Image (cartoon, rainbow, N blue to C red):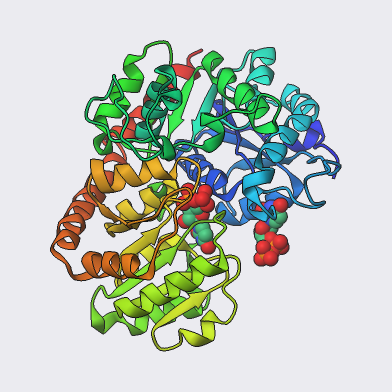
Amino acid sequence: AAAATAAEVIPTGGPVCHAVLFPFMSKGHTIPMLHLARLFLRRQISLTIFTTPANRPFITASLPASAAASIVELPFPHDIPEIPAGVESTDKLPSVDSLFPHFALATERIRPDFESALENLRPWPSFMVSDGFLWWTEDSAEKFGIPRLVFHGMSNHAASVSRAVAGDRLLFGPESDDELIAVTRFPGVRVCKSDFEETARTPDPEGPFYDFVMKAFGAPSRSYGYVMNSFHEFEPVFADHLNALGKQKYYSVGPLCLAEVDDVCNDKKEVVLAAKPAWIQWLDEKLWEGKSVLYVAFGSQAEISEEQLEEIARGLEDSEVTFLWVIRKGGGGLEERMKGRGMIVGEWVDQRGILGHVSVGGFLSHCGWNSVMEGVCAGVPMLAWPMMAEQPLNARMVAEEVNVGIRVEGSGRTGFVRRGALENAVRELMAGEKGKEVRRNAKEYAKKARKAMEEGNGSSWKTLNLLIDELSNK
Ligand code: UDP
Ligand code: UDP
């Protein structure tokens, strides 16, 4: 596909405030940005959303058909040796671990087309929100004098702690991988080296990851501010800390997964009429058993070895819990074997729909930040099993800071979880004393999250209004 022509990208008439959104091509980054789009639409702001051809259908399907948003496709480079042809989204990469930097660096090739499209936008954009991984959009924004906000798909906790640890150069200290390190700015915070990316600890200046990190971490210092998918009440200390650093503001405007309300979702009728997927029907059948089902899902990217999948299966069997398990890659034969004990799904599911189902009483999660927010909003307590990226920090948030979940012993960036450890954690969450405590907390935070997003008076609602006011007047 060619770059969109000017005629296609001019929104027709309508409101004067016009925002540009550019999500990164990962499901975990695109989904929350589309929720943000809904929040803008509810405020009568017109939108132009940039994406690539293969990612467009997902975006179109995620927004109401009536949404006043123009979607502009820009071609994604298909001649990068490390990236299989046709792949335009990190969840389609054969291995995200090794290929991510190549993918992220390749996005810079979109820049010339992005700038030609940007130049032709009318009405002229008041501001731009683009993902932190699309660092080069900062240069485009500066070139055209458009204030840019960095979309930061992580918690205030992870952002604060990572900065403090990097600032103190703690990752190069003498501590062993699993020893707690003393973070001067946060005396109470528990972190160890293995909570951080290996590449951050032993950077290879010749490698693509280093190149990406250097680019991606430098650009935001020139941006207007950060949009955070969180709510102040969930992590006040960390949100305040970031804002006290001065210079730029961090706007906590979430949980973004609560952006959807009936009045903007005009397609609701169709949703009601559509047949329920098999797993929702299965959850319906469990209604009379109370909140008995453990939902097991590790996000859109996780790569789990066959050996670990088998161990999970044994642990779930031994715990005697009823489970709904989403397996995105591998796990052949498990579906048949697990019949009667639980259900295994290999398709893309509506995770928020599942978490909101009355039969679901627990969430075994990799602690991707979206999943954490979605679990909290549903009031479902979690079993924290972090795997990559900043997930180990999120797991600490869940199990140690706000206590809405229990850490699975042995889990981590390089860990292997034994069936017994998983069995114990499941039993504790679903029937133990600690389980009761974290369930209570999760329910409390679910109420606070709703309150934060309340139209008019919620803290996140007001923060987003503040941001819009600041930028519309410029
Ligand atoms: N998709 C995407 N990025 C890509 C490739 C596909 O977002 O790089 C979207 C695609 O538009 C569709 C969904 O992912 O909405 C499923 O893609 P595919 O046709 O590959 O089917 P799958 O085998 O993943 O179900
Ligand atoms: N998700 C979904 N259906 C799936 C898999 C994932 O709706 O089958 C959604 C999930 O609800 C979340 C996002 O994809 O909004 C995944 O983001 P997260 O930060 O949890 O993890 P990541 O995929 O980035 O590791």
Question: Where 418 sits versus 40, above or below?
Answer: below
What percent of the width, then of the height, locates residue 226?
46, 25
Picture quadrant of residue 256: top left
Q: Residue at x 67, y 37 (%)?
A: 101
Q: Visible in this render: residue 73?
A: yes
Frontmost residue, 114 versus 336: 336
Frontmost residue, 200 versus 459: 200
Question: Where 245 sits versus 155, above or below?
Answer: above
Question: In the rendered image, which quarter contains the N terminus?
Answer: top right
Question: Where 342 sits versus 145, above or below?
Answer: below
Q: Visible in this render: residue 255?
A: no
Picture quadrant of residue 416: bottom left
What percent of the width, then of the height, locates residue 18?
58, 28
What percent of the width, then of the height, locates residue 227?
45, 30
Q: Is residue 405 left or right of residue 74?
A: left
Frontmost residue, 197 versus 90: 197
* Count of marks overlaid on the render: 0
What percent of the width, then of the height, locates residue 157?
34, 33
Q: Residue at x 66, y 45 (%)?
A: 98
Q: Residue at x 77, y 32 (%)?
A: 110
Question: Where 103 sits versus 237, above or below?
Answer: below
Q: Residue at x 82, y 37 (%)?
A: 3
Q: Is residue 271 left or right of residue 330?
A: left
